[in-house]
Image (spheres, helix red, strand yellow):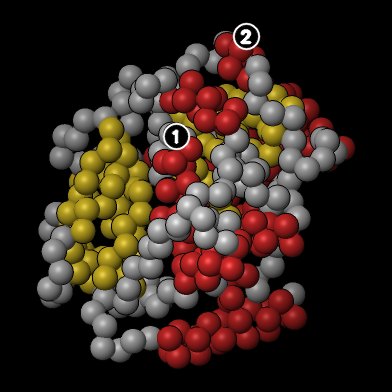
C-alpha cells in the first residue's frame, strides 16, 4: 500500500510537470462537450475545458504511423482548471483535470437528444451545445454496455494487444461487432429504451469512440469513461472495477424506475463487477449478457454467473450475441 501511494504521488507530480510544459498560456480555453444524461428532474452536462480541441479526421488510405500520430495527439491535451462554465444561469468550475459537471433543471424536455448551450463565463467564443439524452416515458428497459471486446474488437484482455489496437487504429479501421449493432438496435427499440456505455477507456477517446460508433451504425448513448492520467493509472488495477461499478450504479440511480440489462465480456472481470452491482442494486438488474473475449468462460466467471442467477437475474454467456434477443424474450424480459 505504501509503495502504491508513493507511485501515485510520483505519477501525479509527473502529470503536473507535463501539463505545465504543454500549456499554451496565450491560448483561450475552449469547451469540449460530452454526451450527458438525465435524472427525473435534472439534466447532467459533462465536458472538459482545454486550450484546444484535438479532433482528427483520418484519411481512408493512411497507414498505422499516421494513425499513431493522430491517436497520440488525442492524449496530449492541455486541460485548464478553475474555469467557470455556465448553462441556463447555473455555473460550475472546471476541476484540476479540466473536467466540468453541471446539473441544470429540466424544462419540460421530451424524450430524445437535446442540445444545451454552454459557455465559458467571460469568454468570447459562441456557446457550445452540450448533448443530453432524456429517456422516453415509455421505456421498458435500460441498457448498459461495456465497450472494449463487447461492442468493439479491441483485445483489452491483453495489455500489449489493447495498446497496439488503440494507438494504431483509426475511426475508419476500428471494428464494431456486427452482432452488437444488431442486438443494440433491437434493445433500443427504435429509441424507446435508453442506452448507456461504461468503459475504462480514457475521456480523451470520447469523440473518437463516438465517430467509430456512428460509422458502424451503433446506437449512440451517454458514455461514462475514465480519467486516465499517469497519477490515476498509478493507483492500481482496482480503479478499473471501481470506476465501472460506480458508473453503473450512477446510471441506475438516475433511472430508478427502469430495470436494466448489463452487457459485457469475459476479458476484464465484467462478471465480477456486475455481480457486485447486482448485490447492491436491489433487483434493478434484470439481465446480464457476457461475450466470451479471447478465451472460454473461466471458473471465476462461472461462479459469479451462477451467483447472479441465484439472485433471480437472467444471465447469458456465449461466444457472440447470437440468440440473445430470443433468450431475453423467453426469460420474460420485455423489450
User: In the rendered view, does 229 fall on the left or right side of 162?
Assistant: left
Q: Is residue 70 above or below residue 158?
A: below
Image quadrant where residue 305 sits? top right
Q: Residues within 10 Å of mark 2 (few under 14, many from 20)?
A: few
Query: Image point 19% across, 35% down: which residue?
Result: 109
Which quadrant holds the N terminus?
A: bottom right
In percent of width and height, residue 63 lies at 57, 61
Mark 2 and mark 1: Cα distance apart in space: 27 Å
List the residue tagged with mark 2: 330
Q: Secondary structure at mark 2?
A: helix
Which badge, 2 or 1, comes first in the chain's sequence?
1
User: In the rendered view, does 305 fall on the left or right side of 172?
Assistant: right
Q: Secondary structure at mark 1?
A: loop
List the residue tagged with mark 1: 217
Q: Is residue 141 above or below residue 251?
A: above
Mark 2 or 1, closer to the camera: 1
The image shows a total of numbered marks equal to: 2
Image quadrant where residue 79 sits? bottom left
Query: Image point 68% across, 33% down: which residue?
Result: 290
- Pointer 2 with pointer 1, Cβ within 8 A: no
Query: Image point 40% across, 44% down: which residue?
Result: 222
Circle number at residue 141: none
* Of the pair 46 and 2, the residue shown nearer to us: 46
In percent of width and height, residue 75 lies at 49, 70
Q: Residues within 10 Å of mark 1 (few under 14, many from 20)?
A: some
Query: Image point 35% across, 49% down: which residue?
Result: 35
User: In the rendered view, does 290 fall on the left or right side of 84?
Assistant: right
Amino acid at each position: 500500500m505504501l509503495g502504491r501511494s508513493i507511485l501515485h504521488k510520483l505519477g501525479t507530480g509527473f502529470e503536473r510537470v507535463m501539463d505545465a510544459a504543454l500549456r499554451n498560456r496565450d491560448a483561450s480555453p475552449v469547451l469540449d462537450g460530452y454526451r450527458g444524461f438525465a435524472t427525473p428532474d435534472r439534466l447532467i452536462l459533462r465536458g472538459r475545458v482545454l486550450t484546444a480541441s484535438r479532433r482528427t479526421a483520418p484519411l481512408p488510405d493512411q497507414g498505422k504511423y499516421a494513425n499513431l500520430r493522430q491517436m497520440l495527439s488525442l492524449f496530449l491535451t492541455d486541460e485548464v482548471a478553475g474555469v467557470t462554465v455556465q448553462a441556463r444561469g447555473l455555473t460550475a468550475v472546471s476541476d484540476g483535470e479540466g473536467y466540468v459537471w453541471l446539473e441544470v433543471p429540466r424544462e419540460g424536455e421530451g424524450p430524445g437528444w437535446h442540445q444545451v448551450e454552454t459557455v465559458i463565463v467571460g469568454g468570447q467564443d459562441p456557446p457550445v451545445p452540450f448533448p443530453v439524452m432524456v429517456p422516453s416515458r415509455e421505456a421498458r428497459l435500460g441498457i448498459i454496455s461495456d465497450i472494449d471486446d463487447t461492442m468493439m474488437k479491441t483485445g483489452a484482455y491483453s495489455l500489449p494487444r489493447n495498446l497496439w489496437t488503440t494507438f494504431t487504429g483509426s475511426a475508419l479501421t476500428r471494428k464494431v461487432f456486427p452482432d452488437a449493432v444488431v442486438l443494440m438496435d433491437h434493445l433500443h427499440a427504435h429509441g424507446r429504451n435508453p442506452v448507456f456505455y461504461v468503459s475504462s477507456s480514457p475521456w480523451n477517446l470520447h469523440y473518437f469512440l463516438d465517430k467509430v460508433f456512428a460509422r458502424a451504425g451503433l446506437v449512440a448513448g451517454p458514455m461514462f469513461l475514465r480519467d486516465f492520467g499517469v497519477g490515476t493509472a498509478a493507483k492500481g488495477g482496482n480503479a478499473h472495477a471501481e470506476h465501472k461499478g460506480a458508473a453503473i450504479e450512477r446510471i441506475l440511480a438516475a433511472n430508478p424506475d427502469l430495470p436494466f440489462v448489463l452487457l459485457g465480456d469475459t476479458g476484464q472481470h465484467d462478471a465480477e463487477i456486475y455481480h457486485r452491482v447486482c448485490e447492491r442494486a436491489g433487483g434493478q438488474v434484470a439481465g446480464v449478457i457476457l461475450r466470451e473475449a479471447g478465451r472460454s468462460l473461466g471458473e471465476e466467471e462461472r461462479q459469479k454467473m451462477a451467483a447472479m442467477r441465484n439472485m433471480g437475474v437472467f444471465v447469458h454467456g456465449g461466444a457472440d450475441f447470437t440468440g440473445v434477443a430470443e433468450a431475453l424474450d423467453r426469460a420474460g424480459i420485455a423489450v
